[in-house]
Image (cartoon, helix red, strand yellow):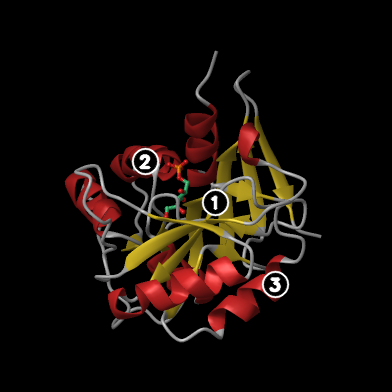
Amino acid sequence: MHNPKEVAGRRAAEFVESGMRVGLGTGSTVHFTLLRLAERMAEGLKIVGVPTSIDTQNKARALGIPLADLESVEALDLTIDGADEIDGRFDMIKGGGGALLREKVVASITRRQIAIVGADKVVARLGAFPLPVEVVPFALAVIRRALERKGAGVVPRLGKDGNPYVTDNGNRILDCRFPGGIGDPGALEAELDRLPGIVETGLFVGLAHTLVIGHEDGRAEVRHRS
Ligand code: 5RP
């Protein structure tokens, strides 16, 4: 039996070509992409990466992947990133790993966004996975109440040490369950973006172009958005 995350992560690295500026996502699936990119670099591949989190920055540095920041890079050829859920239109919930804000900024300047997931994350309707919402600390109680008024079950995220989870940007995360799931991801994203205090939501709508699904039998299935 194969690890679906490894299957998807390694397959996506094959889309990378020499000379590309590549957005490097965050999480355990991207971990395998980074390993494969390092292998390919040892064979001559030359790229510059832009990491979406401090965790990915550290991993990429340890693997010898050259990095740049957004001061020097205006646009990215390709970004490879995981997802917590993805539907048939390639709309996604992201942010399980807490990197949603930087991931969305990087996605916004990317020509081709590749989502990499194990088959269990492909869903008909988003929302079984709680939606991460990044909030400035000052507004936490305000936003929590506003989300609850919209019917969401809201859980402030805690870190492994039991203290409030703090993002790379110094913010907090509220994990939100919407009963019955999320019928219209674009409308919900727009609605939440209007609340002062929310920095970003984990709804990624219309951003992914290609989906790589890893299967336990070792197959990597590649789908393109129509
Ligand atoms: C981090 C993310 C990750 O891409 C998402 O949580 C999937 O992670 P993993 O590959 O570990 O399952 O959005 O903010």
Find residue 126 and report its horizontal and vertical position in percent: 68, 52
> Which is closer to the viewer, label 3 or label 2?
3
Work out which quarter of the rendered image holds the N terminus and state it: top right
Give the residue at mark 2. Answer: 31
Quarter of the rendering containing residue 143: bottom left
Find residue 127 and report its horizontal and vertical position in percent: 65, 52
| Badge 2 vs badge 1, beta-carbon distance below 8 Å | no
User: Label 1's element?
Assistant: loop
In terms of depth relative to the viewer, which is nearer, 223 or 37?
223
Residue at figure coordinates x 49%, y 54% from the top left: 80
- Ligand 1 closer than 8 Å to label 1 CB: no
Give the residue at mark 1. Answer: 130
| Badge 1 vs badge 3, beta-carbon distance below 8 Å | no
Q: In whole angstroms, how far apart are the C-alphas of marks 3 and 2?
A: 29 Å
Considering every residue shown, the one lying at the far right of the view is 226
> Which is closer to the viewer, label 1 or label 3?
1
Residue at figure coordinates x 18%, y 46% from the top left: 62
- Where is 179 relative to 218, above or below? below
Inspect the image, locate mark 2, and give the three-letter code of the amino acid beneath it: His
Give the residue at mark 3. Answer: 186
Going from N to C along the chain, the mark reached first, 1 or 3, is: 1
- Ligand 1 closer than 8 Å to label 2 CB: yes
Considering every residue shown, the one lying at the far top of the view is 1
User: Label 3's element?
Assistant: helix
Inspect the image, locate mark 1, and give the three-letter code of the amino acid beneath it: Pro
